[in-house]
Amino acid sequence: MKNFKADIRKYLYPLAASLAVTILIGLGPFGRVDKWAQDYLFQKRTVPSGDIVIIGIDEEALDMLGPYNTWDRTVIAAALERLASDPEQKPAVTAVDILYAGTSSPEADARLVRAAEDLGNVVTASMARYGERIVWENGHVLDLQTAAVLDFYEPFADLKAVTDQGHINAMTDLDGVMRHALLYADRGDGEKVPSMAAVTAGRYLESRGEALVLPPTDRADHFYIPYSAGPGDFYDGVSLAMLISGQVPPAYYAGKIVLIGPYAPGLQDAYFTSIDKGSQMYGVEIQANVIQSLLEKNFKKEAPESLQYVLLFLAGACAMFLFLRLRVSGGAGLLAALLALGLVLTVDLGKIGILTHPIYLPIALTALYVMALAVHYLQASRARRALELERERIEAELSLAARIQLSALPKDDPPFPGRREFDLYADMRPAREVGGDFYDYFLIDDDHLGLVIADVSGKGVPASLFMMVSMSMIRHAAMESGPAADPAAVLRTVNRQICSRNPEEMFVTAWLGILEISTGRLTFSDAGHEYPLLLGADGQLRVVKEAHGFVLGAMEMTRYRSASLDLAPGDRIFVYTDGVTEAVNEEKVLFGMERLTGILPEAGRHSPRELVGLVQEKVAAFAGSAPQADDMTMLCISYQGL
């Protein structure tokens, strides 16, 4: 019976833990972060279609034609007349992203109708107004409709008769970001009206003898927008004023899709989108992106939620079963392997048009791994009730954490055997068993060497975990950028990633340099880190203060700058963390910058290893037996030339 109960628990615990984690994730606390990660993985700028032209109602048009609310319909009529002025060079389709519900002056309405009819293939806007509606029956509430059609607006009758109509309804996700478009809007009478983008794309394809293929939608007729261009990418600066005044040659829009719509901040038709959450995109640009995706049949479909949660539960249960049976180090290795596999599967599915939740599996596996660690801890506690045995267990875990941390740092000696163009050495000495400092170096390609040194706020295990995440982010962002990587751009990317997933509000100071080996040009950017030191071949020492910026993880919109140095053969760059200059002796006196800059010129022709060792010896002699509060990390590179 005892063995039977043990066997039941062996399978029940993983199932219960995975179910709890799946339910927690399903409640949505990580939804916003997940969406942003999905945006980062699946929204990539490409080349805007040359078949789509935007004529903007921009500031120039408002300056020329007066405030928008004073315009009558002859303004757009004049624009359509200009588009039709050369019968041989008309647009293939013209979509006007302006709602003309109801009549105005008879003359203005008639002119607009004539202009649209003469131009031909004009798409005008309609719009549904949604809201809540109570359904009553016999004096009792029968139903509450939360997305009922309260009104439907469409062009006045004469204009509707000579144009095609498409709705311009737009709605954002709960975080205020527009990721989806509505394929059909309900008129409220059972009839559905397709979107302006769908009608426009369909008319354009029809003019070329092709048929429109509609994207996959959910039950509410929404579909995911794969943006091809960011804010401003589609717009060539062609104003409605320029078109009306005859400054736009017909060849510019002949045979193309012309979109006319608001393109000024005061017109209140701009949204944050998943391709760029830092700048708003005008509605007419969103129409252009949707049209391009329809023309290119570039569709993406979000995998069913229920299926994703079922798979998440099953994967979590299997992983938890293994976590409970592996040692801590084995479980960490399994966790790393599963996280890498999950990322690969997510990206590969995205490439074939299936979108999944990118961070749900990592969160679930990490949470289950932590739970498994907790179970291991409880099991160890029961076996070791004595205080001394408990202390030894903690020391063993810290030692393992230190080994895991140190194993993440590059330790090859020499770092790159066979490379004679440079000599490199780095070392990190934590103030505790594990530290928050780190360094890294890696070849981006055969001619570009990445160099990193950083210091995470805080101490101990939290800092070491944050250190490993930060180190991975910086290396990944630099390698993803390739040989042309800009250190400032890499730091901007990493800063956004840390800010989006940083509940503990930790931060990192970092210095990132990229050395072009063939020329000796060192391009670098500094995020709140200590100033590097340049020790010239002639023995002259210089403090490098260029490109200094704010720390990583504090403010998402922080901007960083890059600067460059041209290293001559024999020049050495020495970078370090504040644990060097802030080392204290028994009298609480700081080692200080003055002592450090006094040591380096004495180093003469020392190799990087010897120079780092010399500084360590001097600091140790100065500090004596005084305990240190901060990690001490140094990196030195000597450029030898080709």
Image (cartoon, rainbow, N blue to C red):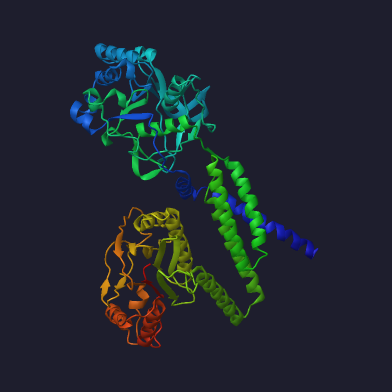
Residue 79 shown left or right of residue 36 in the figure: left
User: Is residue 119 shown above or below 396?
Assistant: above
Quadrant of image for the N terminus: bottom right
Q: Nearer the viewer, residue 611 or 204?
A: 611
Give residue 312's position: percent from left, percent from top. Answer: 61, 49
Is 409 or 134 nearer to us in this picture? 409
Q: Residue at x 20, y 26 (%)?
A: 65
- Residue 470 seen anywhere in this rendered image of the structure: no
Q: Residue furthest front?
A: 642
The residue at 53%/43% (across/down) is 350
Looking at the image, which is closer to me, 58 or 415? 415
Corner quadrant of residue 159:
top left
Q: Position of residue 109 (x, y in %)?
A: 28, 14
Locate residue 102, reporting x and y percent: 33, 17
x and y, in percent, of residue 96 in the image: 34, 24
Position of 239 with respect to 322 (left or right) is left
Q: Residue at x 43, y 77 (%)?
A: 431
